[in-house]
Image: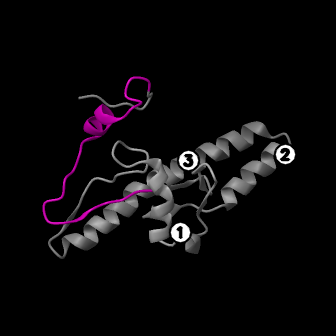
Amino acid sequence: MVITIGAKLEKQVTGYSRRGETLRGVILDGIGSAAVDSLAPEVLRLIASEVSSRGYQISSPVYPGMPGFPLTEQWNLLGLVNADEIGVRLTASGVLVPRKSTSMVIGIGPHMTKWTQAEVCARCSLRETCHYRVSE
């Protein structure tokens, strides 16, 4: 799946920056990051609720760039979900546009695997330097 809060916030942040209102731009950009970070778990909750009525579960999400899921697969993922329908595309270097977007893959079925945040962090290549790292 690909989710986004859209491009309007990004345009406003750029406008603030051009007018020299850097602090406003930084604050609004942070709000946008928080919004997309909150949107992903909500979408996963909605999907989990929908599939549970059929006796299924969802797996933990896997994001392009995680071990075993190269970032280069981002192009395939966006093609599979027709991301252009919601205005999401990739730059040549693989960055999602609008930037306040994210992509992931989940499994749906019986007995799906779920990982704790600590388990995900333990496998991440940034585990030693990440400020958001969770350990058991």
- The amino acid type found where label 1 is placed reads Ala
**Comes first in the chain, label 1 or label 2:** 2
- The amino acid type found where label 2 is placed reads Arg
> Going by the image, does 23 lie left or right of 109?
right
User: Where residue 134 sits: x, y (%)?
Assistant: 32, 31
User: Where residue 33 sits: x, y (%)?
Assistant: 55, 47
> Going by the image, does 21 lie left or right of 4?
right
User: Where residue 120 sits: x, y (%)?
Assistant: 30, 39
Residue at coordinates 20% horizontally, 70% vertically from top-left? Answer: 52
- The amino acid type found where label 3 is placed reads Ser
Q: What residue is pinned by disc 1?
A: 83
Q: Is mark 1 in CB contact (under 8 Å) with mark 2?
A: no
Q: Is mark 3 in CB contact (under 8 Å) with mark 1?
A: no
Q: Secondary structure at mark 3?
A: helix
Alpha carbon separation for disc pair 1 and 2: 29 Å
Highlighted range, magenta? 103-129
Residue at coordinates 26% horizontally, 62% vertically from top-left? Answer: 107
Q: What residue is pinned by disc 2?
A: 18
Outermost residue toward the right?
A: 19
Residue at coordinates 25% horizontally, 37% vertically from top-left? Answer: 119
Q: What residue is pinned by disc 3?
A: 33
